[in-house]
Amino acid sequence: MFAVSLLEAVRAAQRVVVLTGAGISAESGIPTFRDAMEGMWSRFRPEDLASPQGFRRDPQQVWAWYAERRGKVLKCQPNPGHVALADWQRRCAELLLVTQNVDRLHQRAGAQNVHELHGNLYEIKCTKHGAPSAWPEPIPDMPPTCPHCGDWLRPNVVWFGEALPMDVFEAASQAVPQADLCVVIGTSGLVYPAAHLPLLALQSQVPVLEINKETTDLSQRAQWFLQGASGQLLPQLLRAAFPED
Ligand code: BV8
């Protein structure tokens, strides 16, 4: 089922960087980012709703999209792929989990110190001064306004055209070249600078394992490519690598 070289690499790895995308949450019932443009949102491009311009143009519409996505996320549970990564992190102290996802299913599966490159659906922040606070339930006004300055409040996510949290991206960028193994799971690798991280691993001669239902631009260049659902492949891989458990 798995190459011996892959099992040996997983067993021996002391420093692992894992980058996840929407695909790892698909089996939890959360549409992938591209699929999130379904139903009434199908007439929009992601960049129309996930951008400062889109928010300025129609804050109510953007809030409605995020509130709907958050509602779905709160009803979903982590799947065996999230659980397997949290288990692996307990075994491998230096496993850095970096995610593009905003659903916090890694944390809800028990993963620690998750680096969120693109924010999350559990916090909001003021458009002006940015200090995050808990997502209000229910949302008081639409759009809610900051009690300090009156500007609009917004989901604490990173929109297209916005800089990533530099400390988070820097930490991930520094960990990759030092890693024994880089694992890339459920991402189309289309969005930068997150998609730069696997390329940095390749440039640094860090072995890359990709897990994806479909091939991506990375698949040919990764040392190992496992095609299939991460919720099935991750538990199988870790059981094969650590059979004594
Ligand atoms: C930046 C949070 C610069 C919000 C997201 C013009 C102007 C400005 C910037 C740009 C520009 N042109 C290009 C850029 C750069 C831009 C970019 O990359 N654009 C793309 C479209 C080309 N990037 C940015 O704008 C970034 N910021 O560049 O800032 C800057 C610097 C300094 C100062 C100021 C500015 C910010 C990008 C962050 C955007 N926010 N999310 C929200 O969620 O609403 S991006 C969002 O889309 C996700 O977070 C994720 O990153 C991305 C989607 O990717 P995936 O996660 O991969 O999901 P996708 O659906 O694509 O793929 C799913 C995969 O899973 C598939 O491969 C599928 O096969 C697989 N799969 C499915 N099921 C399974 C599975 N695999 C395994 N198992 C399964 N069961």
Image: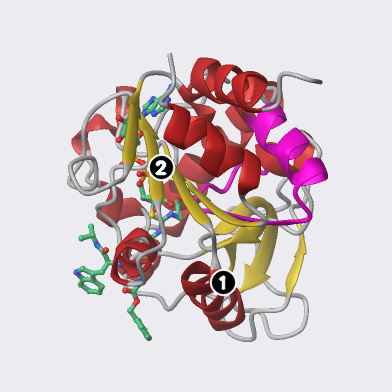
- Is the residue 4 above or below the residue 192 in the image? above
Where is residue 101 shown, x and y percent of the image? 52, 47
Estimate the spatial distance between the alpha carbons at disc 1 and disc 2, rounded to whole Å. 16 Å
Q: Position of residue 63 (x, y in %)?
A: 51, 50
Can I make out residue 80 in this image? yes
Q: Which mark is residue 209?
A: 2
**Crowd class of label 2 (few under 14; some 14 to 19; many from 20; radius 10 Å):** many
Disc 2 residue type? Leu
Of residues 61 and 90, the one drawn nearer to the viewer in this rendering: 90
Is residue 138 something that shows in the picture? no
Residue numbers of the magenta segment: 82-104
* 101 in magenta: yes
- Image height of 59 relative to 24, above or below: below
Q: Specify the color scheme.
A: secondary structure
Q: Callout 1: helix, strand or loop? A: helix
- Where is 102 relative to 119, above or below? above
x%, y% of residue 9?
53, 43
In the picture, which quadrant includes the C terminus?
top right
What residue sits 74% from the left and 53% below the top?
Answer: 135
Q: Nearer the viewer, residue 182 or 43?
A: 182
Kindly identify which numbered label has been placed on residue 56: none
* Residue appearing at x 32%, y 33% in the figure: 225
Dot 2 falls on a residue whose secondary structure is strand
Q: Which residue is mark 1?
A: 175
Query: Is disc 2's CB within 8 Å of ligand 1?
Result: no
Label 1 neighbour load within 10 Å: few <14, some 14-19, many 20+: some
**In what quadrant of the picture does the N terminus appear?**
top left
Residue 52: quarter of image: bottom left
